[in-house]
Image (cartoon, rainbow, N blue to C red):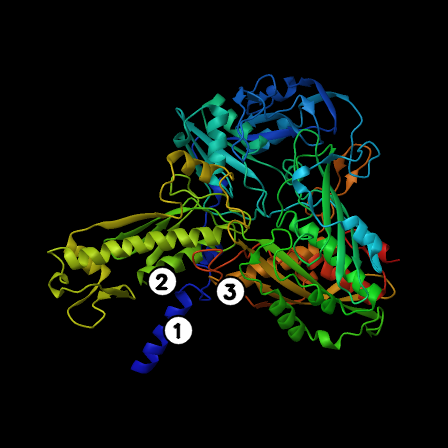
Amino acid sequence: MTVHDMKHAASDSARLEAVGGRLSRVDGPAKITGAAHYAFEQQLEGLAHAVVVGATIAAGKVSGIDTRAAETAPGVLTVLTPDTIMKLNGASDWFGNPSPRPTYCPLAREVTYSGQHVAAVVAETFEQAVAAAALVKVSYDEIPAIVDLSDGKAGDGIPIEAMTKEWGDAQAAFAEAPVRVCAAYNTPREFQAAMEPHGLIARWEGEELTIWEPSQWLDGMARTYAEWFGVPFENVRLVSPYIGGGFGSKALALAHSAVAAAAAKMLKRPVKLVLNRPQNFTSYGGRAATRQTVAIGADKDGRIQSIVHRGINETAVDGMWVEPLGSVTSIMYATPNFSSKQNVVRVNTVVPGAKRAPGENPSAFGIESAIDELAHELGMDPLEMRLINYAEQDPHAKKAWSTRQLREAFAAGAEAFGWAKRSREPRSMRDGHQLIGWGVAAGTYPVRRAHGEAVVKILADGSVVVESSSIDMGQGTYTILAQTAAETLGVPVSQVSVKLGDSHFARAGVTGGSRLAGVMTGAVYKAAGQALDELVGLALSDPRSPFQKLQANTLQVRDGRIASPRGEGPELSIAELMSALGRDRIEAKGDTLPANTTPQERYANYTTIAKSIPHTEGEWSRHSWCAHFVEVRVDEDFGTVRVSRVVSALDSGRLYNPKLAESQWKGGIIMGIGQALLEEGIVDRRHGRIVNGNLADYMLPTNADIPDIQTISVGIPDPHSSALGGKGVGELAIVGIAPAIANAVFHATGKRVRDLPITLEKLI
C-alpha cells in the first residue's frame, strides 16, 4: 500500500466514523457472539422464580382464592394474593401527578379485563412455579363486560376537550362545497409483540433495590419503584444494558414489576418474573382500537375547503389512554375551515399504551385514505391532489415549519418509483391473473424534544468512556454516541466505549417519541467538548506538558494524537500526554438543560415527561416528514394481497448514521405492512378474552412478506430541532404506510377497504 493509499484509507475511515458516517453497529459483535447479556439473564445466588396468575373473566370481583394445593406443591416459597402481598404506596403518573389512591395493590380484587393479575406463586425453580400456579383456584362474581368499541353497552364515550381543534366554520363550508367525500376508517387493537418478553429480576439489599429489567426509561421507572416502596430515589438502581424490542411498551414499571419487587422484599432473596407469551398480550396495552370519520369538502379544482374529523378510541375501565387521532389530520393539508373532536370509550381491556407512532399512525390512515378518495372523486392524480393542497405553514399552530422537505420527498419518491407511468383508472394495470395497484400516502411525526446528560471520560491509556442512563433497544444508541464522542474528541471510534442502561449513570429521560438521538447526541457533544477543552487547556498550561512552552492558543487532536495546528512542536498520543500530566482521567458531565435549572426541575426532567418541550415551542413547528409509494399485487381469483414494492422518501433532518436510519425506516415500513395486511387483536365476545394472544396466531410479517424496500433521505440539517440538526427517525416511517397500501389496493381492485387489516374476505 502506497502512502497515498494509506492516507486515502485513513480519510475513508474518518468519514465512516464521524457523525453522518455509515458505521456498522458497535454493539453488533456482542449480540452476534452472545456476549451481550440482556436484563434478566443475570445469574444471582439464591434466585427464586415467580409466575403470575391471570383472571379468566373480563369484569367482576374475585370472590375467593384457594391456594392450599399450590402452597404445598414442591419448591413453593409463597403464594401471593391481594390479601397476602405487602402493601405498596400509590405512585405518581408519568407527568408527575400524585396517585389518586394512597395505596397500590398489583394483584386485583376488582377485575376489569381478562388476564389481569390476581395471584402469584414464587418457587425455587421456574418449572415448580408454573406447576403450582396451575393449582391456584380462583372464583369470581362475574358481571357483563364491554368487550370492544362495537359493544352496544359501550356508548358514545367521554369527550376529550384537549383534542378539539377548530378554525373557520368547517360544518358550513363542508355543506357548501361542490365536491364532498365522507367515510369512516377503523383500526383494530394491535400489540407490540416484541421478541423479548417483559420481565425482571428484583434484589433487595437492606433498603436498596436493584432491578434488572428491559426498560425504555430507567430514571422514570426507578422513580416509580422508589415511590411504591417508600425509599429514596437514589436507593433504586435500574439496569437494562440491551432490549429485545420495546416499541413503546417498556417505558413504565407495571403490575408484574411490583409483584416481583414485593416478593423479593418479603422473601429477602432475589426474585425473577418473566411473563409468558399470552401474558405479554394482556399485562400491558398495545395500540388502542380506533374509529374515525373524515369528511372533506373541496372545490372542483381539488382545493380543500373544509375538513371535519370525528374520532374515538378505546380505553380501559380503570385507566385513561388518548390516542390523538387528529394529530396528522390537522397539519398535513391547508384548509381554511377545520374541525376535529375526539371521544374515548371505556371497555374491559388493559389500559392501552404507546405503540410506534401513537396517534399519528391511525390519524394518517384516516386522512390519507380520505384524500385518495377525494382525488378519485375528482378524477385527479392522488399525488397532484396532495401537492395542490400543500401546507406552506402549520395550519393549526399558524407557525412556519422548521424544515419541511415533503415536496422534495414527493418528487424524489415519485421519480424513483416511476409514478408517472401509473394508469389512473382502478383495475387498469395487471400482470396475468394479478391486479397491480399503485398507491401513495404521506406521513409525519413531531420532533419531540427534552433534555439529557452524559459523562465523558478520557482515561490514562487514551481511551474514552461515555456513560448515560439512556438505552439502546435496537435503534443504534451505542453507535451514534460513540461516533459523536469520537468526532468531537478527535479519536478513533475503536477507542470509545459507550456504557448505557444503568440508572446510576448520568441521567436521561424516556426513550420514546423518536427523541433520544437528538437529545443524547447533544449531551455527549457538550460533555466531550468540555473534556476536550480541559485536555487542551492542561496541555497548554501545565508545566509538565511538552506543549507548555509553545505559547500556542490552541492545539488539535486527530486520530488520538495531539499537536499544534501549525505543525510546530511535539506530537503526542493522548496516552502520552496524560502520562506527562500525571493524570489518570479527565471527566466532564454535559447536559442540555438551561443553566439556571434547579435540582427539583432536573429530577422532574428525567423522571417525568412534564418538562418535555412542545414541538411548536417558540416560532417554529418541528416535524419529520415522509412520502410512501407502494405497489401491490392482488390475485384476481383468490383476493390475496401482497406488497411487491415500496419506495419511501423521508425527511428526518441530518442523519447521524444513515445506515442505522435506513434500518429504522425499513423497520417502520415493515410494521406498517403488518398493520395493513395482518395484525388484529381478536376478542372473544363471550368472555372478553384475546384469543390470538401468541406469536402463532397474532399475524406478523415475516421475511417472505417483505418486498424490496427503497428509502431515500431528502432531509437537510434542522438547527431548530436539535443541536446537531437531526429530526425524529424511528417512528416516522410507519406513519402513512397502511393508507398507501389501502390506496394501492383500491387502485388495483376498485374496492375501498376502510377497516384494517385488509384481508381477502373484505375484497369480495
Mark 1 Cα shell of 10 Å, populated few (<14), some (14-19), many (≥20): few
Residue at numbered disc 2: 487
Is tag 1's residue or tag 3's residue first in the polypeptide sequence?
Answer: 1
Mark 2 Cα shell of 10 Å, populated few (<14), some (14-19), many (≥20): many
Check disc 2 and give the amino acid type: Glu
Res 645 quadrant in image: bottom right
Is tag 3's residue or tag 2's residue first in the polypeptide sequence?
Answer: 2
Res 65 quadrant in image: top right
Residue at numbered disc 1: 12
* Rendering coords of residue 14 (x, y %): 37, 69
* Rendering coords of residue 15 (x, y %): 40, 70
Q: Which mark is residue 483?
A: none
Check disc 3 and give the amino acid type: Lys
**Image-based side of 382 in relation to 730, left or right:** right
Which image quadrant: the C terminus?
bottom right
Residue at numbered disc 3: 659
Placement of 186 over or under 556, stated as above or below: above
Mark 3–mark 2 CB contact (< 8 Å): no
SS type, badge 3: helix
Nearer to us in this view, 65 or 301 = 301
Q: Is residue 187 visible?
A: no
* Rendering coords of residue 185 (x, y %): 78, 50
SS type, badge 2: helix
